[in-house]
Amino acid sequence: MPHHADQSPNITRRNFIAQSSAFAAAPLILSNPASARRAVANEQLGIGFIGMGIRGRNVLNGYFKNNARARVLAVCDVDTARREHFQNLVNEHNNNTDCDAYNDYRDLLARPDIDAVVITTPDHWHTLQSIHAAQAGKDIYCEKPLTHSLEESRAIIHAVRAHGRVFQTGSQQRSEYDHKFCQAVEYVRNGRIGPVVSANVGVGDAPIPCDLPGESIEPGLDWDRWLGPAPSRPYHSDLAPRGIINHYPAWRRYAEYSGGYFADMGAHHYDIAQWGIDADASGPFQVLPPLDETSMRGAKLRFENGAEIFHGGPNGTTFVGTTGMIHVDRGRIVPVPGNLFETPIAEDELHIPRHTNHVENWLDCIHSREKPICDVEIGARTAACCHLVNLAYKLRRKLTWDWRSWRFENDDEANTLLDNPRRTGYELPPA
């Protein structure tokens, strides 16, 4: 088993856990992270899974179950029955007992035989676990929305860059769905609908505070660890249903754990909008609330190139240009005028790469050390767009955003909302 993860001679399971036990400890300084031995194309990567709910299961079964390029060596979940189920599932499939199961993800990160991790935990955990994985020298695939606050977006980019990791955000519309989204972006970026006036994104509602009552909790769930950085509160099964589940839990609805159903799918469709207006490495400079003071649609993000992203319209992303339109969602792509796609993209125009799937692109890049199609900055800036729109609905006034410094201009109140309240011991590591 090749060891592609950077491992300082001083990093062992014991001292990694000791150094990170308070979660806010200073980042582990790895010995020359950028000098990791590059993977040989036919070597099998050791993979660890953190979070084994429905999304973790789907990624495991859909991309790794029969993948000769990667071997799942460990799974982690705070639900005992769930982690043991997936440990047994992997071992039965591989006809061995090589897969271990952990309650604490730091135990998994401390293993030198794990080259890369897949993080599919609830949103409020994504950034801290990704930062700790980067510090431990692991390459990372993390589900969207990548972050839970603007400050997390800044911090996750910094950590991944500082430790030289290959990072794929799980916004798989860039790689899959018959490449409809690639086609849409290709035609938009090549000017086939003229300059983009607006990208309209049809997704759900902003989050609400969690007001669920407390319930009794059966043994086998580490509820405190599930909460992590989020405020302490009693258990409720809507947030963390037990055992093997076949639905997406309702924690997505609540501000303490997520950016709402808005950010849940907004992380996909704002990603496409951002891609289409060529803003992957920047951000909006202005955030505008809807004209109707009670509406939960209509917030706008304004970009320096003149384009806007508007929250509203049909499900998916609709690019509106001066000479045409393209609507794209997972089921269809519709150009206006209808014959727009009859003229193919010329050889000397921008061509969006087509990948077999999102995970294969990540594995390719682990070997090449190139950036995947949805690198950490792309995912973090898409998440930031979602956080900015949620703040527009919360504050109901125009905001001026400096995407370079990750701060609002002349707005002390808005700057107090750059991060969410964190429990002691779960602070982000210093920059």
Image: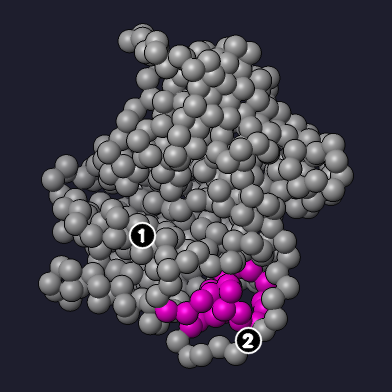
Question: In the rendered structure, does residue 229 fall within the stretch colored magenta?
Answer: yes
Q: Give the residue pinned by disc 1.
A: 58
Residue in the picture at 47% in, 66% down: 247
| Element under disc 2 | loop
Specify the principal SS of the magenta part. Answer: loop
- Give the quadrant of residue 123: bottom right
Q: Is residue 254 visible?
A: yes
143 in relation to 268, above or below: below
Kindly identify which numbered label has been placed on residue 215.
2
Where is residue 202? Give x, y as percent.
62, 40
What type is the residue that disc 2 sits on? Glu
Out of 69 and 63, give the one closest to the viewer. Answer: 63
Q: On the image, which quarter does residue 53 sit in?
A: bottom left
**Residue at image coords 72%, 61%:** 208
User: Quick check: is 286 in the magenta stretch?
Assistant: no
Question: What amino acid is at disc 1?
Answer: Asn
Mark 2 crowdedness (10 Å alpha carbons): few <14, some 14-19, many ≥20: few
Residue ID at (69%, 57%): 207
Specify few, some or many for label 1: CA neighbours under 10 Å numbering under 14, 14-19, or 20 or more: few
The boundaries of the magenta stretch are 221-243
User: From the image, which quarter does the N terminus lie in?
Assistant: bottom left
Q: Position of residue 43 (x, y in %)?
A: 15, 49
* Residue 281 placement: quadrant: top right
Q: Is residue 419 above or below residue 269?
A: below
